[in-house]
Image (spheres, helix red, strand yellow):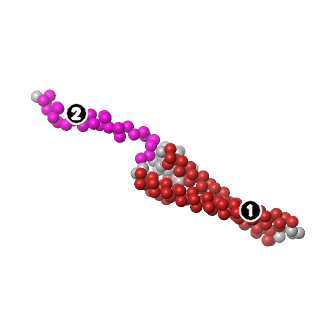
Amino acid sequence: MLTTEDPANGRVPVDASWYCSPTSRRPVMARTLAKSTLKRLRALLESEQERLSRLIEEYEQELEEARLTETSSDRSPDPGSAEAGSLKFEYEKELSLERNAVDLLRKVEDALRRIDNGTYGVCEVCGGPIPVARLEVLPYAATCVNCARKA
Ligand SMILES: [Zn+2]
């Protein structure tokens, strides 16, 4: 009869190992990126962090110089001159570049924090996985392509 075949057909041990497997209870939210991929992306983020920090320092120095120049041009007899105008333009340009760099640095640092707390690669809007191909190009991406388009 069939009962004599049951212990030998392999179904019982397979089922048992499936129930005991710790890997079948992964949290849904965690993004499982290969360690080597994560390491590579972290290195990218860290070098970007360094580059941006240096850039911001340079901008701040240039802004400081521009401020000094602007102060002295205020004392000049003709503050509305073309030269004063172009200096102001330089200053504004420098300022917006610095803001962009500060903004980007904040994103990079957020991404490094997400690597540390294990939420890196998870879209912060929909909770879906961000494809590795996107992370390779934009390692600080906090949203998937769909959510980035909607934003
Ligand atoms: Zn999303």
**What stretch of residues is rendered in magenta?**
3-32
Mark 2 crowd level (few <14, some 14–19, many ≥20, 10 Å Cα)? few
| Residue nearest the observer in this picture, 16 or 60 | 60
Q: Mark 1 points at which residue?
A: 64
Q: Residue 12 carries which label?
A: 2
Q: Position of residue 107 (x, y in %)?
A: 57, 52
Helix, strand or loop for disc 1: helix
State yes or no: residue 14 in magenta: yes
Q: Position of residue 102 (x, y in %)?
A: 63, 56
Q: Residue 61, relative to residue 149: is it above or below?
A: below
Mark 2 → mark 1, Cα distance in angstroms:
75 Å
Q: Is residue 5 left or right of residue 92?
A: left
Q: Which residue is drawn at 75% across and 65% down?
A: 66
Q: Residue at x 71, y 64 (%)?
A: 62
Helix, strand or loop for disc 2: helix
Q: Where is residue 128 in the image (x, y as percent from the top left)?
A: 46, 45
Task: Choose the circle earlier in sequence order: 2 or 1.
Answer: 2
Q: In this view, does 150 lie to the left or right of 10?
A: right
Res. 17 image quadrant: top left
Mark 1 crowd level (few <14, some 14–19, many ≥20, 10 Å Cα)? few
Q: Which amino acid does label 2 sit on?
A: Val
Q: Can the viewer see residue 129?
A: yes
Q: Residue 131 carries which label?
A: none
